[in-house]
Image (cartoon, rainbow, N blue to C red):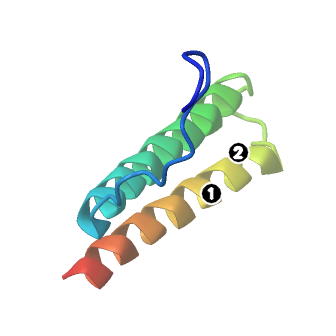
Amino acid sequence: MTAPHQVPNEVPNEVPDAVVAVALRRELLRLAALEDSLAAAEAARVPYWATCPDSVNGHRAAALALRADAERLVSAAA
């Protein structure tokens, strides 16, 4: 018997793959939106005549990659 403050040593119930895929896709899209926001914020600090920092392109590339991974999840589930 475990004390009231201890967590019993049990294996949690398994979560269906579809639920995990939906949650993972949602998180990938959230991260992609965050990368887009970071790119926009960094680009906004640069005068329009100046070249954007490489980090802006890096954030945009990260957003594209995250969205591509999210789409692969959808394709793999279908």
Spot occupied by residue 19 in the image (x, y as percentages of width and height): 27, 57
Q: Position of residue 30 (x, y in %)?
A: 44, 41
The answer, for residue 48, to whether it is visible in the render is: no
Name the residue located 72 percent from the left edge and 35 percent from the top edge. 49
Q: CA distance from mark 2 to mark 1?
A: 10 Å
Residues marked 2 and 1 touching at CB (< 8 Å): no
Residue at 55 percent of width and 66 percent of height = 65
Task: Please report the residue visible at 25 percent of the width from the left and 65 percent of the height from the top.
Answer: 18
Query: In the image, is 77 to the left or to the right of 48?
Result: left
* Rendering coords of residue 71 (x, y %): 35, 70
In which quadrant of the rendered image does the N terminus lie? top right
Name the disc covering residue 62, or none.
1
Residue at image mark 2? 56
Residue 56 position within the rendered picture, expressed as x and y whole percent measured from the top left: 70, 45
Q: Amino acid at mark 1?
A: Ala
Name which residue type carries label 2: Val
For this rendering, which residue is in front, 60 or 11?
A: 11
Secondary element at tag 2: helix
* Residue 66 versus residue 78 in the image, above or below: above
Q: Quadrant of residue 40?
A: top right
Residue with the most extreme left position? 78
In which quarter of the view is residue 63 placed?
bottom right
Mark 1: few, some, or many residues within 10 Å (few <14, many ≥20)?
some
- Can residue 27 be seen here? The reply is yes
- 17 shown above or below 37: below
